[in-house]
Image (cartoon, helix red, strand yellow):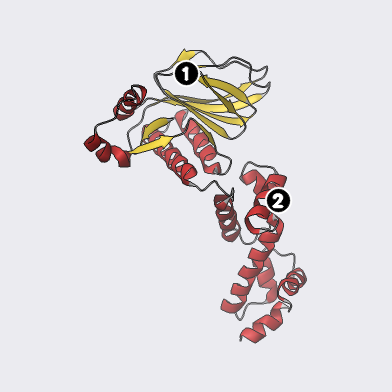
């Protein structure tokens, strides 16, 4: 467990991608910085102060500055991961000392600082929040840029990662329903209504395989991703027919990604028991 301070100015000391062709053992070291390690593809076993953490794809390991980190065996050949190192703030250093000494912090001071502190698990499974991976990649790209606002932008990406970690840890995990994935998929479909996404295209968006995507949707709403997308598209067509009474059916088909009006009519009749022309006449 690690305490991280929100909205503090940060100094990122290193950031990059690493591919281990033959496998590697995690270095035996004590860094002054926090080490954020994100697994892109593969598995790895890392120890912090004698406690073992086993990483898989889309896991984030946050190794606290000042603690002993090491590995005992090679990661898998072809392992791909990314990392960045960030200096702890003065508050984080104080919180760490209090935690290690198992000493109760000053009550008044704790109340004042409670809103500034995020309590993070050392190992986090981030597959349900792909934004963490994207912000991580943006931070690394910015670290190697020549942008005159580089320091400020690095701080922003770091804070965005912290926000996502806070949301990740606050999600209800007891039923395993991917509310975040559903919300983001719905937003993606609604913001690009002219596109019919294949399961693979949407799965790639979330860094999962199509089978995993369909399993998520089956658990959350009792239907596959394709069925969910079709139902959402037809709901959008209904709204379009109501609010655009002069528009031709061909326009509705093109606007919402159907091949033509015949494809739309067939899908509409199957779901609502009547063709869109009859539905529109009834609404009028």
Image point (45%, 29%), residue name = 143
Image point (66%, 85%), residue name = 281
Q: Compared to 228, does 10 lie above or below?
A: above
Compared across the picture, whether 174 is left or right of 76 comes to left
Residue placed under numbered mark 1 in the picture: 49
Q: Compared to 253, does 222 lie above or below?
A: above
Compared across the picture, whether 147 is left or right of 270 comes to left
Image point (66%, 68%), residue name = 234
Q: Residues within 10 Å of mark 1 (few under 14, many from 20)?
A: few
Residue 176's label in the rendered image is none
Number of numbered discs present? Answer: 2
**Residue farthest to the top, as pictured:** 28
Frontmost residue, 177 versus 210: 177
Compared across the picture, whether 107 is left or right of 53 comes to left
- SS category of the residue bearing label 2: helix
x and y, in percent, of residue 269 in the image: 74, 75
x and y, in percent, of residue 278 in the image: 70, 83
For residue 148, say whether it is visible: no
Q: Earlier in the sequence, mark 2 or mark 1?
A: 1
- SS category of the residue bearing label 1: loop
Q: Nearer the viewer, mark 2 or mark 1?
A: 1
Residue placed under numbered mark 2 in the picture: 199
Frontmost residue, 53 versus 283: 53
Tag 2 near tag 1, CB within 8 Å = no
């Amino acid at each position: 467990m690690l305490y991280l301070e929100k909205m503090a100015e940060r100094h990122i000391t290193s950031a990059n991608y690493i591919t281990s062709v033959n496998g590697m053992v995690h270095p035996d070291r004590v860094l002054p910085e926090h080490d954020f390690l994100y697994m892109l593809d593969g598995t790895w076993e890392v120890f912090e102060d004698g406690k073992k953490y086993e990483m898989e794809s889309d896991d984030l390991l946050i190794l606290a500055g000042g603690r002993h980190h090491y590995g005992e065996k090679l990661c898998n050949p072809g392992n791909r991961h990314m990392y960045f190192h960030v200096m702890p703030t003065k508050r984080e250093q104080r919180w760490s000392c209090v935690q290690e000494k198992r000493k109760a912090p000053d009550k008044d001071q704790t109340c004042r600082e409670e809103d500034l502190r995020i309590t993070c698990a050392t190992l986090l499974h981030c597959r349900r929040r792909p934004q963490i991976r994207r912000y991580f990649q943006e931070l690394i790209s910015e670290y190697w840029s020549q942008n005159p606002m580089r320091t400020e932008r690095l701080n922003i990406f770091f804070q965005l990662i912290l926000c996502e970690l806070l949301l990740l840890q606050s999600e209800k995990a007891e039923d395993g329903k991917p509310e975040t994935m559903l919300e983001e998929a719905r937003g993606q479909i609604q913001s690009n209504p002219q596109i019919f996404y294949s399961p693979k295209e949407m799965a790639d968006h979330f860094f999962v395989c199509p089978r995993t995507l369909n399993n998520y949707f089956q658990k959350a709403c009792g239907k596959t991703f394709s069925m969910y997308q079709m139902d959402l598209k037809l709901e959008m067509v209904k709204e379009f027919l109501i609010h655009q009474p002069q528009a031709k059916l061909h326009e509705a088909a093109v606007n919402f990604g159907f091949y033509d009006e015949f494809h739309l009519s067939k899908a509409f009749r199957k779901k609502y028991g009547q063709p869109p022309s009859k539905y529109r006449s009834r609404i009028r």
